[in-house]
C-alpha cells in the first residue's frame, strides 16, 4: 500500500509533462513570415495561371483609353494633312455659251485642266476651245479655227512665293502636326505603362502583405486550443486566454485591412488589365503570383537617350513649325514678280475669225507688285522671332529638368536597391529570432508576451521587405519612363500596336 502511494506522484508528474508538451506544440510551428501562402479572398481555380506583368503591359498598350485617344488624335492630324494636299490637286473646268437671240449667233465651248506645281509657287495649265458663228468685234478673242484651239502655259513666281507660299506652309505645318501627334501618343503610352507597372506591383504587394497577416492570424488561432488545455490543467492562468483572444482580434483586424487594400489595388489594376473588348477586367485573387517580378532592366547611361524623349521631340517640332512660319512671314516682305508663259495653236480650216488665227502663238509676260507699306509682314516677323526664342528657352528648361529628374531617379534606384537588401536581411534575422523564441518557450525558457512580440516583429519585417521591393520596382519604372526606355516599359515590339489592332 505504501509503495502504491509513493508511486502515484510520479505517475501524475509524467501525465503533466505529457500534457505540457502537447499544449506547447503550436508554439514550435513556423513563424508568420515563413508560413505557406494562403488564399487571399477566394479559393484559387486549379487552372488559374498567375497574372504576369507582361500580360498587363500588353493589355494596357492595346486597350488603354488614353492610348486609344492619342491614336485617334494621330488619325485626326493625318486627315488634316491630307486635306492640305488638296491645294495641289489637279482641277478641270469646262464652259459653254450660246447666243440664242440677237444679231450675233456665236457659240463657244472650252475646257481647261490646271495643276499647281510645288516649286516656284506657280501652276501649269492646258486647254481647248472651239467656236462657231459670229461674235461682236469686242469679243474677237473668242474666234477659233473650225477644229478649235489648243493652249498650254505656266505661271511662275520669281520672288515672292518662289520658295514658300501659303499652300506649302500649310502642308508642311500639317505634316509636322502628324509627327507631334505621334510624339504625344508615345508620351501617353509611356505614362500609361509606367502607371500600369506601379498598379500591378501594388496589387502583388497587397496580396503578399495579406499572406503575411493571414499567417500571423492563423498562428494565434491555432495557439488558442493549446492554451485552453494548459488552463484546464492549471499550467496557465485563465487570463492568458483573454490575452490571446486580443491577439487574434488585433491580427484579424490586420487581415481585414489587408483584404481591403487588396480589393482596392485590384480595382486600380483593372484600369490597365482589360478584356478583348477593352472593358476593365478585375483580377481574381487566385491569379496572384507568389513573388514580385524582377525590376525593369535599365540602360547603363539613362542620360544618353534624353533626345528620344517625346516631349523634347514635340518642342523640336514646334520649333520647326515656327521656323517655317518665319520663312513665310519674310516671304511676305518681298515684292511679287510673276512670269507667265503661254503657247496656243489653232487647228483645222480657217473659221469666222479669219487668217489671224493661223500659226502658233506664243506669249510671255511679267507682273510686278510692291506694297509701299509692309508693317503687317514686319509685325508678324517680330512676333514669330520672339516665339522662336521662347521655344528655344523652353527646350533648354525642359532638357535641364529632365536631366535633373533622371539624376534624382538614379539616386532613388540605388537607394531602393540598398533598402531592399537591408529589409531582406532584417527579415531573415527577425524570422530566425521568432523561431528561436518559439523553441525557447516550448522549453519553458521564455514567456507568452515575448513569443508574440517576436512573431509580430517578424511579420512587420516581412511587410517592410515587401514595401522595399515595391519601391525598388516603381523606382526602376520611373527611371525607365524618364529616360524613354521603351523596352523596359513593354513598348519595344510595336509602340503603335493598338492602332493596328
Image (cartoon, helix red, strand yellow):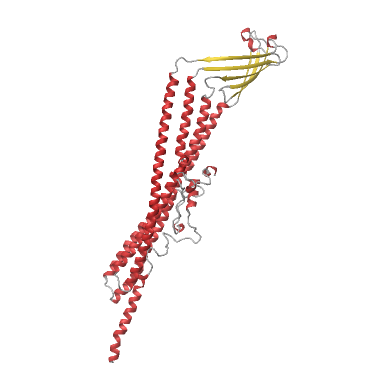
Q: Residue 46: x percent and y percent? A: 49, 62
Q: Quadrant of residue 252?
A: bottom left
Q: Looking at this rendering, what residue extends furthest in the right direction?
A: 349
Q: Position of residue 250 (x, y in %)?
A: 31, 61
Pick the residue in front: 212 or 481: 481
Q: Nearer the viewer, residue 492 or 308?
A: 308
Task: Identify which residue is drawn at 40% across, 33% down.
Answer: 393
Whether residue 100 is visible, yes or no, is: no
User: In the picture shown, does residue 105 fall above or below 439?
Assistant: above
- Residue 342 appears in the figure: yes
Q: Is residue 6 left or right of residue 413?
A: left
Residue located at (40% from left, 52% from top): 472
Above or below residue 329? Residue 42 is below
Q: Could you tell me which residue is drawn at 54 percent across and 22 percent down?
A: 162
Quadrant occupied by the N terminus: bottom left
Q: How many numbered badges does the structure rendering display?
A: 0
Residue at the spot 41% in from the left edge and 41% down from the top edge: 403
From the top left corner, tell me how far across and down residue 255 is, in percent.
Answer: 36, 60
Report the front residue among 31 and 66.
31
Residue found at the very far bottom of the displayed protein: 1
Q: Is residue 346 above or below residue 191?
A: above
Q: Position of residue 453 (x, y in %)?
A: 31, 64
Quadrant showing the C terminus = top right
Amino acid at each position: 500500500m505504501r509503495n502504491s502511494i509513493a508511486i502515484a506522484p510520479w505517475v501524475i508528474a509524467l501525465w503533466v509533462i505529457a500534457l505540457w508538451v502537447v499544449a506547447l506544440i503550436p508554439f514550435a510551428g513556423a513563424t508568420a513570415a515563413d508560413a505557406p501562402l494562403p488564399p487571399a479572398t477566394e479559393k484559387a481555380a486549379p487552372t488559374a495561371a498567375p497574372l504576369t506583368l507582361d500580360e498587363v503591359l500588353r493589355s494596357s498598350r492595346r486597350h488603354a483609353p488614353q492610348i486609344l485617344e492619342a491614336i485617334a488624335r494621330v488619325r485626326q492630324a493625318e486627315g488634316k494633312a491630307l486635306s492640305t494636299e488638296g491645294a495641289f490637286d489637279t482641277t478641270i473646268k469646262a464652259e459653254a455659251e450660246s447666243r440664242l437671240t440677237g444679231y450675233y449667233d456665236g457659240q463657244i465651248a472650252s475646257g481647261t485642266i490646271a495643276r499647281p506645281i510645288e516649286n516656284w509657287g506657280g501652276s501649269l495649265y492646258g486647254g481647248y476651245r472651239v467656236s462657231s458663228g459670229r461674235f461682236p468685234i469686242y469679243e474677237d478673242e473668242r474666234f477659233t479655227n473650225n477644229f478649235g484651239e489648243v493652249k498650254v502655259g505656266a505661271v511662275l513666281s520669281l520672288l515672292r512665293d518662289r520658295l514658300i507660299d501659303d499652300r506649302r506652309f500649310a502642308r508642311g505645318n500639317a505634316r509636322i502636326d502628324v509627327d507631334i501627334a505621334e510624339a504625344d501618343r508615345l508620351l501617353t503610352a509611356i505614362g500609361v505603362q509606367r502607371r500600369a507597372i506601379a498598379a500591378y506591383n501594388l496589387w502583388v504587394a497587397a496580396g503578399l502583405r495579406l499572406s503575411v497577416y493571414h499567417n500571423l492570424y492563423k498562428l494565434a488561432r491555432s495557439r488558442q486550443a493549446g492554451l485552453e488545455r494548459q488552463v484546464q490543467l492549471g499550467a496557465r492562468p485563465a487570463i492568458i486566454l483573454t490575452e490571446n483572444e486580443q491577439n487574434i482580434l488585433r491580427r484579424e483586424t490586420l487581415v481585414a485591412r489587408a483584404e481591403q487594400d487588396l480589393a482596392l489595388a485590384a480595382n486600380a489594376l483593372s484600369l490597365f488589365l482589360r478584356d478583348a473588348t477593352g472593358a476593365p477586367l478585375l483580377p481574381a485573387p487566385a491569379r496572384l503570383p507568389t513573388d514580385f517580378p524582377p525590376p525593369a532592366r535599365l540602360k547603363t547611361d539613362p542620360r544618353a537617350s534624353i533626345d528620344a524623349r517625346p516631349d523634347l521631340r514635340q518642342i523640336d517640332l514646334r520649333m520647326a513649325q515656327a521656323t517655317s512660319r518665319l520663312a513665310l512671314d519674310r516671304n511676305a516682305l518681298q515684292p511679287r514678280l510673276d512670269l507667265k508663259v503661254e503657247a496656243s495653236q489653232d487647228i483645222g480650216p480657217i473659221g469666222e475669225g479669219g487668217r489671224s488665227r493661223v500659226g502658233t502663238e506664243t506669249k510671255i509676260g511679267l507682273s510686278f507688285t510692291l506694297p509701299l507699306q509692309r508693317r503687317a509682314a514686319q509685325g508678324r516677323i517680330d512676333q514669330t522671332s520672339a516665339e522662336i526664342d521662347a521655344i528655344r528657352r523652353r527646350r533648354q528648361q525642359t532638357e535641364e529638368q529632365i536631366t535633373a529628374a533622371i539624376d534624382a531617379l538614379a539616386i532613388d534606384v540605388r537607394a531602393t536597391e540598398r533598402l531592399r537588401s537591408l529589409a531582406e536581411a532584417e527579415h531573415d534575422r527577425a524570422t530566425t529570432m521568432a523561431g528561436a523564441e518559439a523553441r525557447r518557450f516550448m522549453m519553458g525558457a521564455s514567456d507568452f508576451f515575448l513569443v508574440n512580440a517576436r512573431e509580430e516583429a517578424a511579420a512587420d519585417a516581412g511587410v517592410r521587405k515587401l514595401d522595399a521591393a515595391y519601391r525598388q520596382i516603381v523606382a526602376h519604372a520611373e527611371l525607365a519612363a524618364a529616360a524613354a526606355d521603351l523596352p523596359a516599359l513593354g513598348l519595344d515590339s510595336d509602340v503603335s500596336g493598338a492602332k493596328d489592332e
